[in-house]
Image (cartoon, rainbow, N blue to C red):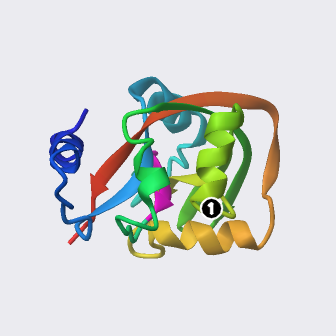
Amino acid sequence: MLLSEAIYLFRLAEGAQPDLSQHYLAIELNDHSKDLLKKRFDPNEKGFNVDPHHVTLKYDLDHEADKGLLSHVGRNVNMRVTHHVSRPGLHAVRVVPIGKHAQSLVASAGKEHPHVTVAHDPTRAKPVQSNDLLAQGPGVRLPKFIHVGGTVRLLPKST
């Protein structure tokens, strides 16, 4: 458990409402899953940051409206990687949660296109642009799905 999660849960137990404006809710991939995605989808092009790190669930959090989502902090989630999508400067993979609990979590977060941004060239794309890319179509279906997993976490927003 990350320190930010421990502090959040401790303050919540004491009845306080910690400041969520500095964090977002995500499924942080475990090391094995990160390694699998790096090996399989590294574009091997100069200038790319290859860092498959997480699936964003919700960026702007609210204590009351997101109480149900926040109750999942610390839970493990399994997913299938089903499609790969790319454009110049950007590579992402579509993920599908496995199991009713994980499916409910992702659905209640309102994620239309759950995905992991695998690699991006910061001179040509931002990771957030994966959302737009996935909205254009499903991408290339993988002949064999890849199983990945992670933990629901509160991650710090970049400044």
What percent of the width, then of the height, locates residue 85? 70, 57
Left or right: where 18 falls relative to 112: left
Q: Quick one: 129 or 156, which is closer to the camera?
A: 156
Magenta span includes 54: yes
Vertical placement of residue 116 versus 98, above or below: below
| Name of the residue lying farthest toward the front | 15
Q: Position of residue 159 (x, y in %)?
A: 20, 72
Q: Amino acid at mark 1?
A: Lys
Helix, strand or loop: magenta stretch: strand
> Vertical placement of 100 versus 129: above or below?
above
Rendered residue at 59%/42% (across/down): 41
State the SS at label 1: loop
Highlighted range, magenta: 51-58
Residue 96 appears in the figure: no
Front residue (pair 124, 155)? 155
Does residue 143 appear left or right of residue 35 in this picture? right
- The residue that mark 1 highlights is 111
Residue 27 vs 146, above or below: the answer is below
